[in-house]
Image (tube, rainbow, N blue to C red):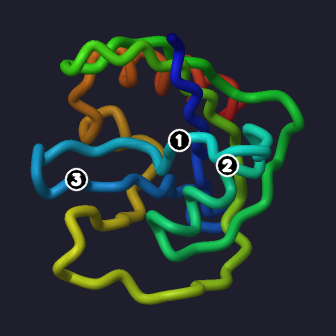
Amino acid sequence: MKTLKAGTVLINLQNQEICLVYNKNDKSYAFPKGHLENGETLKECAIRETEEETGHTCSIINEKEIGILKYITPAGENVELHLYLAKDTGLVTRKINPKDKEEALWVDIEKVEEKILYQDLNRLWLDMKNKITK
């Protein structure tokens, strides 16, 4: 069975920065993302997960996703991740608790590939970056 997830490539257009979520447990960076809830569209999921993981509200820039990544988790879960390009609306809805296992960080668009260690996600990022910077 396939698990659908959605998330955003959250960009601050003024600073040309991308928001990444740092997972303190496995010391990895990724885009804000999560599982689709019952009755939720992929875009609704992407917006909700971005706010939950980063504390920032956002709006989707393009109707179509900017990238799709299919992968199998170490637990054997078959995942299809849909990523949407979104802009930060500047509203911070909550402060992130330092005890949380995740932390949101803004990274210069030219340095994102240095942070993402998962090869498949990094390849997808490079493809998405070309679409963003055109």
Front residue of this view, candidates 108 and 101: 101
Q: What residue do we see at 62% from left, 41% from top?
A: 36
- Closer to the N terminus: mark 1 or mark 3? 3
Residue kind at label 1, given as amino acid type: His
Using the numbered discs, state the Cα–Cα distance from disc 2 to disc 1 in whole angstroms. 7 Å
* Residue drawn 26% across the image and 24% down it: 118
Mark 2 near mark 1, Cβ–Cβ under 8 Å?
Answer: yes
Q: Quadrant of the C terminus?
A: top right
Classify mark 1: residues with Cα within 10 Å, few (<14), some (14-19) or many (20+): some
Tell me which amino acid carries mark 2.
Cys
Find residue 71 and report its horizontal and vertical position in percent: 40, 13
Total numbered badges shown on the rendered structure: 3
Disc 1 secondary structure class? strand
Q: Earlier in the sequence, mark 3 or mark 2?
A: 3
- Mark sitting earlier along the chain (2/1): 1
Circle 3: residue type? Asn
Describe the element under mark 2 as helix, strand or loop: helix
Q: Mark 3 = which residue?
A: 23
* Residue, disc 2: 45
Give the vertical position of 59 relative to 65 (above or below). below
Marks 1, 3: nearer the viewer: 1
Instruction: Tell me whether circle 1 and circle 3 mark residues in contact (CB < 8 Å).
Output: no
Is residue 85 or residue 80 the one in the foreground? 80
Residue at figure coordinates x 40%, y 53% from the top left: 20
Residue 35, label in figure:
1
Task: Tell me the CA gap for discs 1 and 3.
Answer: 16 Å
